[in-house]
Image (cartoon, rainbow, N blue to C red):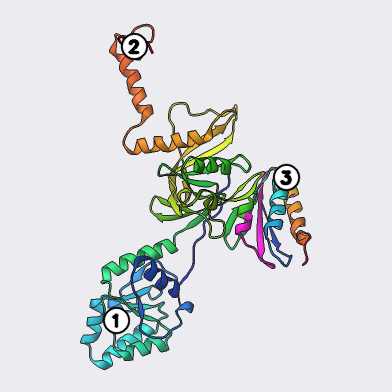
Amino acid sequence: MRTPEPFQKESVSIAFVVEKMRKRVGVEMEQCNTVDIEKRFVTDVNLHRPGVALAGFTALFTHHRMQIFGNTECRFLMHMGEDERQSAFAKLLEYDLPCIVLTDDNTLPDLLLVAAETRGVPVFRTPVPTTAFMYRMRDLLEDQFAPQLTLHGSLVDVYGIGLLITGPSGIGKSEVALDLVERGHRLVADDVVIASKKAEGVLIGSGTELAQHFMEVRGLGIVDVRAMFGVRAIRHQKRIEVIVRMHLWDESEEYTRIEMVDETEPVLEVDLPLVKLPIIPGKNVTVICEVIAMNHLLRHYGYNPAEVFKQRLSDQINSGNGPGRPRRGIEWFEHDFE
Amino acid sequence: MLIREVTVRNRAGIHTRPASMIVREGSRFKSEFFIRKDGYEINGKSIIGVMTLAAEQGATLELLLDGPDENEAADALEAVFERGFGEPI
């Protein structure tokens, strides 16, 4: 099956960044001049401390990044004479900087703030120490600029494992998701899952803004899982950990009989374990999904049932005293008539 | 695989009724069917997917078809868009 092409954001407005930093991580960014920050954009995930650029070396100045003025930069500016300071700062402003952030409660002289304003560069002040600020800002920008991909399928949190249920149209992915929700698991998204690569090897899935927790069940129409099952039945996002691919039973294909997972599928360069699940009459896919999740959990705890079973078998073969016929699980259970 | 570019012609854009028309038409064919808008791509046989495009009048979409009957499917789908889903243009 074809996978759509990845996409990612090209720019994020400074206003959006400031609002998220305030509301979500509690980092205040007070604007020191009056530039319209709705119209300023950052296009790079990285941050830059322009110490060397202030000292006059601008050959490798990454000016398109958000500029962070920590104690070093601010003290350096203040130790210069007035004229020198203004020309050093003006040199920086020859470039189109997305914004300047003064961390650790630092300030700049009003003249410099005005100079930035005339060049349309917003300046912010935050009480948060430089390293802590940069860490949080990076986390936000990394999330915003992460490569994304739309996947066709349902994402359900089953016992804490993110199962992505995929398969051709009309095979019953939504029905399985609904059944899992009914059994107390939590729906992340149905039909359209947006996967974003949060870190190396970590894929986070969520629904779309419009369709979040709405679901189409063929023959019924559109249902709202949150309205029907309540908040306990949903979640905003979940790491995608296992892909379950449903498909019609194919005589010619050889199915896994012992190992639960022996294949992986790359999504945004993250290798996810893939379980191919043939659909046959009488098969309860929901229960199988629960078993897949539990088995994945067991493996996390270092228990691989297939390995354990293989070991038991070879132990018996090698013991040399195995009987000709299989023995009962318990040889004699005294006076048990049940 | 083939790609066709189409434009949303009706005034109301792809709301629920046009979305179900697109899905119904696409599902008649064996070929895989995707729709792309602004780099965002969804499965054209999923009604929720088509609706998340929230395509307005004048929006250009790319129809991607892949399969044994991709030509017939592309023609049929193009016709659906050309008619403006039978709605006021």
Which of disc 1 and disc 2 is earlier in sequence? Answer: 1
Give the chain letter at badge 1. A
Give how far apart the Cα atoms at labels 2 and 1 are. Answer: 87 Å
Tell me the residue that label 2 is attached to. A336
Foreground mark, 2 or 1? 2
Give the chain letter at badge 2. A
Residue B4 among those drawn in magenta: no
> Do circles 1 and 3 both sit on a common chain?
no
Is residue A312 among the parts visible in the rendering? Answer: yes
Q: Position of residue B78 (x, y in %)?
A: 74, 56
Q: Position of residue A311 (x, y in %)?
A: 33, 23
Tell me which residue sits at (53%, 55%) in the image: A212
Q: Is residue B82 left or right of residue B5?
A: right
Residue B9 sits in which quadrant?
A: bottom right
Residue A81 sits in which quadrant?
A: bottom left
Q: Amino acid at mark 1?
A: Leu
Say which element carries label 1. Answer: helix
Tell me the residue that label 3 is attached to. B28
A142, A301: nearer the viewer:
A301
Q: Quadrant of the C terminus of chain A?
A: top left
Quick one: label 1, few (<14), some, or many (20+) residues within 10 Å?
A: many
Tell me which residue sits at (28%, 13%) in the image: A319
